[in-house]
Image (cartoon, rainbow, N blue to C red):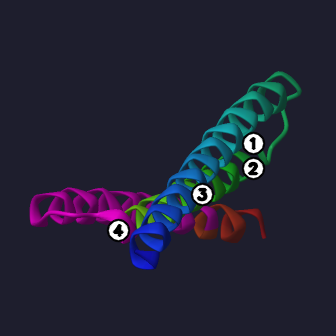
Amino acid sequence: MNFIFLEEFLNQAVDCAILLFELMGVLVIIISGLRGIYDYAKRNPAIRLNLAQGMALGLEFKLGSEILRTVVVRELSEIATVAAIIALRAALTFLIHWEIKVEKESEQ
């Protein structure tokens, strides 16, 4: 009986954390995009670096939500879907971090 309660509590806690991480990721990406527009209007030379860093941070939050999603997965097909999403987001994060590195090197 207690295990059912704990399982439901875990599912609810993970669902809330997933929503929070997804929301934070979306907000960070939106704010970074708005800052990018502002930097573009001001002709800030660091626009690409700032935008890439904001997108990388937003993707990190979204990747965290996908990792949490693996806790509540019930079927093998769901695991494959979540794994594919994690792989795609990790690849995007890697590419953005590479872009950040290139931008920082070109500034020096």
Tell me which numbered mark, 2 or 3, is placed earlier along the sequence: 3
Q: CA distance from mark 4 to mark 2?
A: 31 Å
Q: CA distance from mark 1 to mark 3?
A: 31 Å
Q: Position of residue 101 (x, y in %)?
A: 61, 70
Left or right? Give the position of 1 relative to 76. Answer: right
How crowded pointer 2 is (Cα within 10 Å; few <14, some 14-19, many 20+) is rated as some
Q: Residue furthest top?
A: 41
Tell me which numbered mark, 1 or 3, is placed earlier along the sequence: 3
Tell me which numbered mark, 4 or 3, is placed earlier along the sequence: 3
Residue at 83% over, 21% down? 41
Q: Callout 3, which amino acid?
A: Ala
Residue 35 in the image: above or below residue 3: above
Say which residue label 4 marks. 70
Q: Position of residue 67 (x, y in %)?
A: 43, 68
Say which residue label 2 marks. 50
Tell me which numbered mark, 4 or 2, is placed earlier along the sequence: 2
Q: Position of residue 99 (x, y in %)?
A: 55, 61
Left or right? Give the position of 89 relative to 57. Answer: left
Q: Callout 2, which amino acid?
A: Asn
Residue at 63% over, 42% down? 23
Q: Is residue 99 visible?
A: no
Q: Callout 1, which amino acid?
A: Ile
Say which residue label 1 marks. 47
Residue at 50% over, 53% down? 15
Q: Callout 4, which amino acid?
A: Thr
Tell me which numbered mark, 1 or 4, is placed earlier along the sequence: 1
Give yes or no for contact between labels 4 and 3 (Cβ–Cβ under 8 Å). no
